[in-house]
Amino acid sequence: MPDATTPPDIVTGAFGFTGRYIAQRLLDSGRPVQTLTGRPHVQGTAADPFHGQVQAIPFDFHRPEALAESLRGAQTLYNTYWVRFASGEITFARAVENSRVLVRAAVEAGVNRLVHVSITNPSVDSTLPYFRGKALVEQAIMESGLSYAIVRPALVFGEGDILLNNIAWALRRFPVFPIAGHGQYAAQPVFVEDLAELVVAAGNSPEDSVTDAVGPETYTFDELVRLVARSVSSRSRLMHAPPALALSLSRMVGWMVRDVVLTREEIEGLAANLLVSSAPPLAATSFSGWLDEHGRRLGLHYASELDRHYRMSNRG
């Protein structure tokens, strides 16, 4: 059990995907953990993965003074906050500004260190709002004066993942699976528990750092989909389609499940080979090995991005 006098670590979005694994690793190491979340009502319920061990504090970017107060006394802030796509009032520009508010609050609160989960190959010159926004947040952190570590994962997989789960879900249910373009663009999947280990290790280091977090295997997207298809015993026919057609088909599925399945920016990011790294892989778990063990359960149920992160009752 953590010592009551030990300053807590704070993880944003600990009831989400990546944040959950970071928080659990911190708990396992004996650290007291709190979370900033848009879903504080989850604490202590059957949906709480920590069974009440992680104190939930409401996220409120509109009250920066209260946000700073909630961070006061924290040892390290582990930040996973971001948005996958724009929806309604939730835009990439808003996500960047919210992140800047969080960084300023961490400075005001005297947080010792900030560890930020970013993405491979961000750039302020990118035409893709996701990757440009990630770069702008990194810039704000580097200029803040805080001790920092930035960890840049590629395609994250593991229990609770949305994107790869829903690829498997579609491969299980539809006679045809469209692959945008030639499918020869690459991805370097990283296991979420390996990512959490790297993130927590970065929190324990005193050095400012920027590190890519990628796994030991690199696949073309075509290879990755075929690997998932074999794992779930799919009979779906894989069809290479113009990106616009693949996007239109994904929107039809999205209408059926009341979700955003795929975005144009995600297709363009993959096609630009932005989910790979030239750095040596730091994560050990192979995607193929993980699929051998878990593939039979992958995609049994659809995972909704809008339900998990955007709709008001579940946001955060």
Image (spheres, helix red, strand yellow):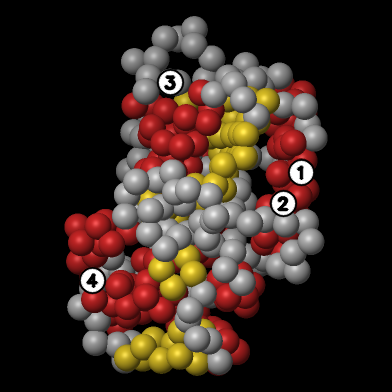
First in residue order: circle 4 vs circle 2: 2
- Residue picked out by circle 4: 231
Note whether 240 is above or below 218 in the view shown: below
Quadrant assignment for the N terminus: top left
Amino acid type, mark 4: Ser
Q: Say which amino acid is labelled 3.
A: Arg
Residue to which mark 3 is pinned:
31
Q: Looking at the picture, which amino acid does disc 1 mark? A: Gln
Callouts 2 and 1 close, C-beta under 8 Å: yes
User: Which disc number belongs to residue 135?
Assistant: 2
| Cα distance between the residues tagged 1 and 3 | 29 Å
Q: Which residue is drawn at 50% across and 92% down?
A: 241
Residue 149, given in percent of the width and then of the height, sits at 61, 34
Query: Could you tell whether 34 is left or right of 283 in the image?
Result: right
Q: Where is residue 25 in the image (x, y as percent from the top left)?
A: 38, 32
State the mark number for residue 254: none
Category of crowding for the residue at label 3, using alpha-carbon neighbours closer than 10 angstroms: few (below 14), some (14–19), many (at least 20): some
* Element under disc 4: helix
Q: How far apart are marks 4 and 1 (CA)?
A: 40 Å
Tell me the element at label 3.
loop
How far separated are the C-alphas under marks 2 and 3?
30 Å
First of labels 2, 3 by sequence position? 3
Residue 161 can be seen, yes or no: no
Judging from the image, what secondary structure is the residue with disc 2 in? helix
Which of label 2 and label 3 is nearer to you?
2
Give the answer, above or below, for where 155 lies relative to 49. below
Residue 161 versus residue 254: which sits nearer the camera? 161
Question: Does label 1 or label 3 sit earlier along the sequence?
Answer: 3
Is 224 left or right of 275, judged from the image as shown? left
Q: Which mark is residue 139?
A: 1
Disc 2, disc 3: CB below 8 Å?
no
